[in-house]
Structures are given as C-alpha cells and as structure tokens.
Image (cartoon, rainbow, N blue to C red):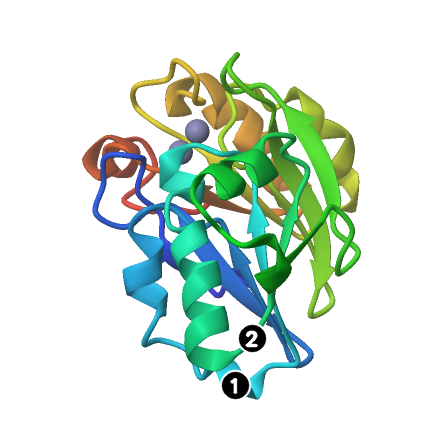
Amino acid sequence: MGSTINFLGRDSGFGDNNNSGYIEIDNNLLIIDCGFAVFNNIKHKFDFKKYDNIYVLITHPHNDHAGSLSQFILYMWFVFNIKITVVTKCETLKQILDLEGTIDSIYNITDNALGIEFIKTEHVVQFNSYGFKITANDRRIVYTGDTCTLDPFMPYMDDCDEFYVDTSKFGGVHLKFEDVKDKLSEIKAKGVDVYLMHIDDYDYIANLNNGEFYM
Ligand SMILES: [Zn+2]
Ligand SMILES: [Zn+2]
C-alpha cells in the first residue's frame, strides 16, 4: 500500500533504523525526524542539490529523533553549501544544537513552513512532544510522532487521508497496540489509511494484525 511518507525506518529507539521518513513536495524535500541512525542513511541517498529547499521536521529531541540533526546541518553546509531549515516546536532544540556546536548562521529554524500544523501530544515529562498535520501531494496527513495517547489527534480524523501512528508492544510512553487496535480500526473505517510505526516488536504487531503494518 503506497504511503505518501516514504519511510527511512520505522523502528523504535533500540532498532537499527530510527523512525523517520521523507516526502518530496513540489521541488522541496521534507525529512521527518533525524535520529542517530538517519544521517548515515540519507547522506548518499539524495541528490540534495536538485531541491529548492530542504526541511527537517523534528517532533521531539529524543536521540532516536534528533540525534544526527547537528551532523546533517554541518554536512549540508560544509559539503553542499546548503542551509537547511529545521521545522519544530521543540522549545529546547535550538539550545541542544548550540551545545553541540552547530553554528546558528548555517541553518534556519522555524515552526512555520509548508503549512505544517503542530499537534502537541503526551510522551515524556522531560520536554514537549509534537505530532503534526500536513497536506502534501493532495493527501491530508496526520503523524503522531512519539505519543502515549491518541486523544490530541482524534479531532483531525474526519479530515484525514493518512494517519501515521506510534504503536508498540511495550506501551509505557508509547501506545500499546492492543490498547488502540479497536480505535485504529474505527479510524480505518472512516476511510483513513492507518500506518503503524516506531515498532519495537514486528512479530507482536504482525500476529495481532494479519501480518501487516498498516490498517
Ligand atoms: Zn522514539
Ligand atoms: Zn521519544
């Protein structure tokens, strides 16, 4: 099933490929999250020079979502002379980038780009975490980021084509798939394509969901 977001990885924090993806919108590249494994995945993947703008959306500062952002910013500037734009609502991200020695004149940072609407959710107490809504390639997309609740996203479900949702076996600061499976089936029944991501145990999800990672 063709999702508009191309996954670079859909593993939880201890997996090999951090949960992340990309969309090409007009002649722009939007990368969603940039965890510690992402830089090595993307550095030879794209012809960066061909894009008008490169955006990296960061949902929250955990290492599996922002761990190679500084490296990517430095690489884009010093190798390609491209200033990327970080799109985030995370209050501490600029400070983290500063502490990592990311020169602030070599990137842009904003919470307002590509019509993205951030949706504040619940994940951990140490900082705020955000999902978002974007309309891209005529598809209305809602993405939870890491979350332990579906509540902030439910008001968007009547107006959504694709829903990307954090689902795990462990639960805790994430959604436990068994706890939300029925709700996700109801969302699917409204005509929304539901994609499962940030997966900590593929066998567990597959066994509960006919071997599939979408609904
Ligand atoms: Zn995560
Ligand atoms: Zn997280």
Q: Is mark 1 within 8 Å of ligand 1?
A: no
Instruction: Quickly name the residue at label 2.
Output: 82
Snapshot quadrant of residue 24: bottom right
Percent of width and height locating residue 144:
57, 36
Sequence-wise, which precedes: disc 2 or disc 1? 1
Height in image: 157 above or below 160?
above
Between circles 2 and 1, the one closer to the viewer is 2
Q: Residue at x 38, y 50 (%)?
A: 68
Q: Label 1: state its secondary structure.
A: helix
The residue furthest bottom is: 50
Residue type at mark 1: give it. Lys
Percent of width and height locating residue 178:
39, 20
| Labelled pair 2, 1 in contact (Cβ < 8 Å) | yes
Instruction: Quickly name the residue at label 1.
Output: 49
Percent of width and height locating residue 146:
49, 31
Q: Nearer the viewer, residue 67 or 143?
A: 67
Q: Residue at x 68, y 37 (%)?
A: 89
Q: Label 2: state its secondary structure.
A: loop
Other residues around mark 2 within 10 Å, as few (<14) / some (14–19) / many (≥20): some
Q: Nearer the viewer, residue 137 or 188?
A: 137
Q: Residue at x 69, y 25 (%)?
A: 152
Residue type at mark 2: give it. Ile
